[in-house]
Image (tube, helix red, strand yellow):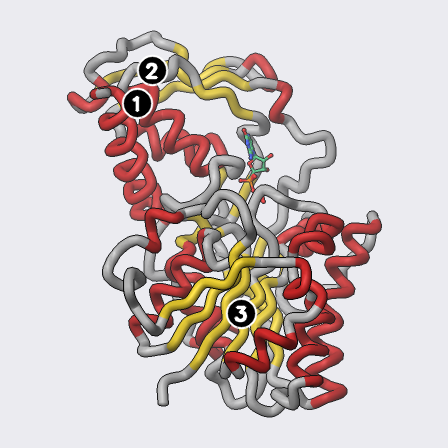
């Protein structure tokens, strides 16, 4: 009998990669999506999904949100991946209104008598990491609680720990640092950069407007990270894990790398909100329509966050030790993959 998995927010970046991984492993995969536009729908259109009896989509509706037990009774999952809310929706109140809350899901597992069958993965809010500005985060960090939203996020984290300890359930939190891909929403800076620069080379845009270029982030590939989500549920005992590359780059560096992949050598001039990215050399025909001296990156104060967490470093050594975690994709390869995907789309759009 194949294993059965349930993935919430399956149409998001992580959900779509995880679904692929599990289907390839022979799982039957049930996914929950929100009503409305089907994010990343194109990734669910190939042979892996179409007419595949092992892949089923359930639409959110009010009764599922308030009672996931019905769905659990129907499909009796071996594994649940609660990937939370679609990216771009950041507040906990959003989670409360559209997502299946951690508590409801864990209670539903118990009430269906599945607490010794179903293993549970919780995508812990990455915002948690923002609550420890300036620190290196491992699984032992104590978070501070500056806002009601933060309280709610920490509460989810500890709810998972509590169900694990009190009811002996196999439940884990994954604290995943930034993980990107061509499927990342453009509300995140990496995708905004690769799409913006690709569009600029094809004459679809003139300039990329960004906020804090000095912000440091630890960026990995989402495809690598979902493997760790799966692996966390395959251990002898449930534990929480930090997943990150352990290496940080600035937004300015990411822009520089992405531009280089598009044949543009950038030079940054000016400081603070006056800073600009100017073309210093064109080194490939991809960018032939541009010229040296063009300003293609500008800092726009609208994108500078008032309360910025710019320095959080991750310590993924526990995952390295216990899960054998090592990122398979370098930042350079991630940038190349994202740039190539956005360049193909931009070329297509420019042709029309
Ligand atoms: P986050 O780590 O979840 O906040 O991921 P983001 O990709 O949204 O932001 C990463 C970093 O990029 C943050 O420090 C932002 O302040 C910085 N950043 C600079 N310019 C931009 C921008 O135009 N959009 C976004 N989303 N972030 C920007």
Give above or below for 253 relative to 109: above
Query: Residue at position x 57%, y 17% from top?
Result: 271
Ranked by sequence position, the earlier of labels 1 and 2 is 1
Q: Which residue is mark 1?
A: 265
Query: Residue at position x 42%, y 16% from top?
Result: 207
Q: Which residue is mark 3?
A: 81
Q: Quadrant of residue 261?
A: top left
Under circle 2, the secondary element is: strand
Disc 3 vs disc 2: Cβ atoms closer than 8 Å?
Answer: no
Disc 3 vs disc 1: Cβ atoms closer than 8 Å?
Answer: no
Q: CA distance from mark 3 to mark 1?
A: 42 Å
Number of the front mark, 3 or 2? 3
Ranked by sequence position, the earlier of labels 3 and 1 is 3
Disc 1 vs disc 2: Cβ atoms closer than 8 Å?
Answer: yes
Q: Position of residue 208 (x, y in %)?
A: 45, 20
Q: Quadrant of ligand 1?
A: top right
Q: Is residue 208 left or right of residue 271?
A: left
Please identify the quadrant where the N terminus is shown: bottom left
Q: CA distance from mark 1 to mark 2?
A: 6 Å
Q: Mark 1: give few (<14), some (14-19) or many (20+) Cα within 10 Å.
A: many
Residue 279 is tagged as: 2
Q: Mark 2: give few (<14), some (14-19) or many (20+) Cα within 10 Å.
A: many
């Amino acid at each position: 009998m194949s294993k059965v998995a349930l993935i919430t927010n399956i149409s998001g970046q992580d959900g779509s990669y995880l679904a692929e991984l599990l289907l390839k492993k022979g799982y039957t995969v049930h996914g929950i999506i929100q009503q409305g536009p089907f994010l990343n729908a194109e990734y669910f259109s190939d042979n892996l999904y179409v007419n595949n009896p092992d892949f089923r989509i359930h639409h959110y509706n009010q009764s599922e949100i308030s009672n996931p037990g019905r769905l659990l009774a129907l499909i009796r999952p071996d594994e649940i991946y609660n990937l939370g809310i679609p990216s771009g929706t950041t507040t906990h109140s959003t989670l409360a209104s559209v997502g299946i809350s951690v508590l409801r899901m864990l209670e539903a597992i118990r009430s269906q008598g599945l607490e010794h069958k179903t293993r549970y993965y919780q995508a812990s809010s990455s915002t948690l990491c923002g609550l420890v500005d300036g620190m290196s985060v491992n699984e032992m960090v104590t978070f501070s609680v500056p806002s009601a939203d933060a309280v709610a996020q920490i509460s989810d984290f500890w709810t998972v720990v509590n169900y694990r300890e009190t009811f002996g359930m196999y439940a884990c939190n994954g604290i995943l640092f930034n993980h990107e891909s061509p499927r990342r929403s453009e509300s995140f800076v990496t995708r905004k950069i690769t799409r913006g620069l690709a569009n600029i080379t094809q004459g679809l845009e003139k300039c990329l407007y960004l906020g804090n270029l000095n912000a440091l982030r630890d960026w990995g590939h989402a495809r690598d990270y979902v493997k760790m989500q799966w692996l966390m549920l395959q251990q002898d005992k449930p534990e929480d894990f930090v997943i990150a590359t352990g290496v940080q780059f600035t937004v300015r560096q990411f822009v520089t790398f992405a531009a280089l992949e598009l044949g543009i050598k950038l030079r940054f001039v000016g400081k603070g909100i006056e800073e600009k990215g100017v073309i210093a050399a064109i080194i490939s025909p991809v960018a032939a329509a541009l010229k040296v001296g063009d300003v293609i990156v500008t800092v726009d104060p609208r994108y500078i966050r008032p309360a910025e967490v710019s320095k959080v470093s991750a310590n993924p050594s526990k995952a390295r030790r216990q899960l054998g975690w090592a990122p398979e994709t370098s930042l350079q390869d991630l940038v190349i993959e994202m740039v190539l995907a956005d360049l193909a789309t931009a070329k297509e759009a420019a042709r029309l």
